[in-house]
Image (spheres, rainbow, N blue to C red):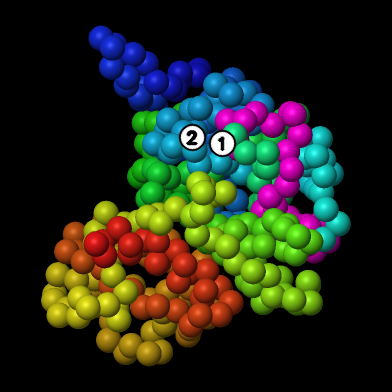
Amino acid sequence: MYFQQGIHKFNGRSYLCLVNTAIGQDIERAISFLKAGETVAIPTETVYGLAADATNEDAVLKIFEAKGRPTSNPLILHFAEIDSIYPYVAEFPETLLKLAKRFSPGPITFILPKSSLVPSLITAGQETVAVRVPEHEMTLALLRSIDFPIAAPSANRYGGISPTTAEHVQHQLDGRIPYILDGGACQTGLESTIVGLADGKVIVYRLGGIPLEALTESLAYEPEVKNELHHGVRTSGMVKYHYATETPLYFMDSEQNAYTDSDGFILFSKSKHAEKSTQHFYLSEDGDMNEAAKNLYAALHDMDQKGFQRIFIEAFPSDGLGKTMNDRLKRATAKFCN
């Protein structure tokens, strides 16, 4: 049984048609929805994505509708393997291909010149397309069973916290999508690093699950980071206000330092803060950066639902995944700093 998702008009006004949202581990059911032109939330190693058949523009429109995402913000295409990417790109430069062979499947996305097979809706009218191979066996099995790539931004409401569990997706998109493929908690917990090529050099357009240091080691130079808006949205994750909680969120070194019992705190490690209560969420017991990254969005989801008046979070060391997490938090707190 299929539930028709989409925008419907009545008396000249548009309404999102709500659907029954199911959660399960049935890959064949997820494939059936995708083939029928519907959206499905899928697990990856980074965050859960909201997937649709990238070759079906009506299906892709449902991604934007469900998320409330502007069509000026391009999407990422997901493939089962690197070789599957070639028909959808005009070229795959050798420098980027070497990175793909080292880090894919994994949390890295490549900006490449698109072929005519990619609808302009995917790229927001740009001549480049973002592509990646995710590292999650359930989603790779799904991708191997279909003959089209899937477009999949994060499976959340636009501007909200990225989901790292099926329950996070349900909290934000319940009634807006027909199926959530439950693959457990995401292992990386941060979106993919997005890279492109300019004047023969690698450019980082979004900090992500592959740290700058790892790219530098592979390239023998540190790539330039261009992750701020300039003449429109180049790719996902560049907008100023993003990844935000509903509860006002601040860095702990902000001017909001008169803490009260109605405030919640997200702390990097327990070792620096012996006190523990329902006001505190420790991202890692012993200060492990990978564990903290995996738990970051889960902590934001958890604390956002506890009724605090404000949430305060520690800034991270500005290297490795800490740089990525600080980038996400800068965008999440920007909503509350004006």
Query: x, y percentage for residue 162?
Result: 45, 53
Judging by the rendered image, the residue that carries numbered circle 1 is 124
Find the magenta span and give its range: 96-123
Q: Residue at x 74, y 43 (%)?
A: 113
Query: x, y percentage for residue 91?
Result: 82, 44
Q: In the rendered view, tell whether residue 256 sits above or below residue 11.
A: below
Q: Residue at x 40, y 66 (%)?
A: 329
Amino acid type of the residue that numbered disc 2 sits on in the rendered structure: Thr
Q: Residue at x 27, y 86 (%)?
A: 275
Residue 333 seen by the camera: yes
Report how many numbered discs are placed on residues in the image. Answer: 2
Amino acid type of the residue that numbered disc 1 sits on in the rendered structure: Ala
Query: Is 191 on the left-hand or right-hand side of 127?
Result: left
Is-magenta flag for residue 19? no
Q: Quadrant of residue 143?
A: top right
Query: Is 144 on the left-hand or right-hand side of 281?
Result: right
Say the numbered circle drawn on residue 207.
none
**Dot 2, how many residues are within 10 Å of its Cα: few (below 14), some (14-19), or many (20+)?**
some
Is-magenta flag for residue 110? yes
N-terminal label among 1 and 2: 2
Residue 27 seen by the camera: no
Q: Quadrant of residue 250?
A: bottom left
Query: Could you tell me how far apart the alpha carbons at marks 1 and 2 are, in whole angstroms?
Result: 6 Å
**Dot 1, how many residues are within 10 Å of its Cα: few (below 14), some (14-19), or many (20+)?**
many
Q: Tag 1, which secondary structure?
A: loop
* Viewer-nearest residue: 143 or 193: 193
Q: Residue at x 56, y 41 (%)?
A: 74
* Viewer-nearest residue: 200 or 13: 200
Judging by the rendered image, the residue that carries numbered circle 2 is 71
Query: x, y percentage for residue 112?
Result: 73, 47
